[in-house]
Structure formats: C-alpha cells, structure tokens
Image (spheres, rainbow, N blue to C red):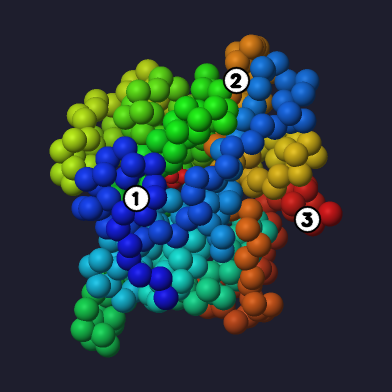
Amino acid sequence: MMTEVKGTARALFEHYPGLAQTLAHTPLADLPAPVARWEGFARDLDVDAVWVKCDDVTGAIYGGNKVRKLEFLLGRAVAAGAGAVITFGAAGSNHALATAIYARALGLDACSMLVPQHNAHTVRRNLLRGYAAGALLRHHANKALVAVDVARQIRQYWKKHGHLPHLIPPGGTSPIGIVGYVNAALELADQIAAGELPQPDRIYVASGTMGTCVGLCLGFQLAGLAIPVHAIRVTRPSFSNDERARRLHTATVKHLRAHDASVPEAAFPDAGFVHRHEFYGEDYALYTEASVAAVRRVRETEGVRLEGTYTGKALAALMADAAQGALHGQKVLFWNTYNSREVEDGGLMYTALPEAVHRYFEEAVQALDVPMAQLLAPR
Ligand SMILES: Cc1ncc(COP(=O)(O)O)c(C=O)c1O
C-alpha cells in the first residue's frame, strides 16, 4: 500500500515550494510525461509540426489524464483518513475506472455511481476492468436515482465502518483535481524551457468536465506562456460551458492561494481559452465520422490508439483546422488524455457484473463503433 507523501518532485512544487508542504498529494504518476513529434501524422496536413504530450502513459498501471487529478484527490482522501471513495460518471467512464484502480493501489474501497451512455466496446471493457479492480458498480437510469443511492451507500458505510466515504466529483473536476493539470502545464513549460519541444502556437485537448483544459490555462498563465488552449467540447453544454470554466478557474486560484500566498492572482484568460463546439456531433459518447477518421489516421501513421468519445473528437478538430489552412506554418500540440496501458479484466464474463449493466453486453454497440473497434484491435 502506498502512503501519502508530501513534497514529491512535481513541477508545481518546484515553482511553489510552499504548496509541497501544504497540499495533500499522493504520488501515483510517473512524471514528467514525455513529449513526441508526430511526423507521419502531420505529413500532407497544412501544419508545420504536430507535437503530442503523452499523458497516455502518466501512470504505470493506468495512464490518461485522470491520474494527474487523482494524485491530489486521492491524496486528500488519504489525508482525511477515508477508507473508501465514491465517484460518478457515465457507464464507460475512464475516470471511474482510473479511480477504482488507484484507490485499490492505495488500499481504499471504491464505488462507481454510473449513469447510461451510448454503447461501445470501450464501455464493456471499462465495466469489466472496473469490476476486476474491485469497484462496487452501481448503475442508475438518472442522476436523481444516483443521489438516493449515494445517500444509501454512505449510510451503510457509516454503519459498518463508523466513518464516511470520500466523494470525488465526476471527471475528478474540482479545484483539488484541477491542480493536477496546473502541474501538467508547468511541466510542459519546463520541457519547452529545456528545449524538448518548441513553444506550441496552440494546444488541442478534449473538454469533458473541463478540469483538464482549465488547469492547463491556469498553469500556462502561471508560467507566463501565452499558449491558446483549444478546448474541444465533447460533453453536453451543462458540463462544458464558458461560465463553468470561469468559475472553476477562479476557485482553483483561490484554492492554490489559500495554500500558498506566493501563487499570484490570475483572472480567467479570455484570450487563452478557445472553447470549440463544432466537433461534438449529436451527443456525448456518440462518435462522429470525423472522430473515426482521426482515430484511423493516427493509428495508421503513428500506431497510437485513441477512442471516439474524447480524443478522436479533439484530434478531428486539429485535422479540420489544418484542412482549412488555419494552422499553416504553425506548431501545434495535441494533448493525449487517453490511457494506453494494458489493463486486465481478469477474464471475467459479463454475467459476473451487476445485472443493471448487462444491457451493454447484450445490446448492439453504436454503428460507428464497428469501424472503431477494427481500428483498435491489436495488429
Ligand atoms: C480520455 C479522456 N480525455 C479527456 C477527458 C476530459 O477531461 P476533463 O473531464 O478534465 O475535461 C476525459 C474525461 O473523462 C477522458 O476520459
């Protein structure tokens, strides 16, 4: 079992040593995440260079963007003496899976409160993996039923253990979790300063619950770098909207300054945040032709596996901008937020899972998941 460690080598703590003493943090990630250049992918696109921040390998047992947030979220849970965490997401949530995997690594119980989503192979895989990681999977038709069940789970946990489980918000997005992406931006700033890559003219990243893009914007502000973050909205507007970005940014600045007054005041960077809505398609987790084409191109040119809900849509934005000549002569960076580590599902049959999720295995996947599944199959 890992224990809480303060003062781990993180760009954030090097820039603001006071935070290393005051912020609860558990090292889960293997940082800095590398950067790479996608030359094959960029060939024939009207762009000078495409770089990638490889957050797919943030953690040895599970990568992706959630690991950075969980360092602070689970750090807080451990510091509070919690024995269990409850988190929230759609049925195939990468965040719920990452929480289950890292909670277990820390010796905590995990419960995933899930709501319906469009069906895909990734949903099936994540449900099996979450269950194999020991998470209690609870699936409900809507948020109101989730709220009732959360109250029930908390009561039961209290009766059994005499203390409360720790709640982690959807996507790990709260000022506590966002700090993980402030750290990520400072980490990239250090890599730029060290000459590992040029300063990008813009960054493309998927925006789900907005923690990733807001943390990046704030981190670049703190680093004094003017790099516009193109936040590609992939969720419904109630999750990804400008007002929410502004509120999260303000709350994160307040959170950091409460722990270390040397963190400067920073107003929401209007020019540094470009919220893009045109790649969403018809719904959250419903793939688009453009996202499948983006996943195909990067699989064929770089051998990298993305998916259709988040990263495929973000990369489709980059490709569309290049096709329109908007990236002519520019160096851009794609932030890869999707886990690429192999995760065991223990060879489980879906019938071992709670009955409420059997439908994902018994009903057809969405039509565009058929070409997607072929692209993602091992060669
Ligand atoms: C692969 C992937 N990319 C991007 C995101 C979006 O990150 P955020 O919720 O911080 O906006 C998620 C969120 O679940 C994700 O799983």
Along the horizontal axis of the image, is 329 left or right of 273? right
User: Quadrant of the rendered structure where residue 54 is?
Assistant: top right
Per the image, the residue denoted by label 3 is: 377
Dot 2 surroundings within 10 Å: few (below 14), some, or many (20 or more)? some
The answer to whether mark 3 is within 8 Å of ligand 1 is: no
User: Which label lies toward us, 3 or 1?
Assistant: 1
Q: Nearer the viewer, mark 2 or mark 1?
A: 2
Asked whether residue 368 appears in the rendered view, the answer is: no
Which residue is painted at 30% across and 58% down in the image? Answer: 6
Mark 1 falls on what kind of element?
helix
- Residue bearing mark 1: 177
Q: CA distance from mark 3 to mark 2?
A: 31 Å
Residue furthest bottom in the image: 160
Q: Which mark is residue 331?
A: 2
Image point 64% across, 36% down: which residue?
36
Q: Which mark is residue 93?
A: none
* SS label for mark 3: loop
Q: Amino acid at mark 3?
A: Ala
Image position, residue 142 (x, y; %): 40, 60
Q: Along the horizontal axis of the image, is 93 left or right of 270?
A: right
Q: Residue furthest right?
A: 379
The image position of residue 334, as x and y in percent, is: 58, 33
Q: Cβ(mark 1) to ligand 1 < 8 Å? A: no
- For the C terminus, give its image quadrant: bottom right
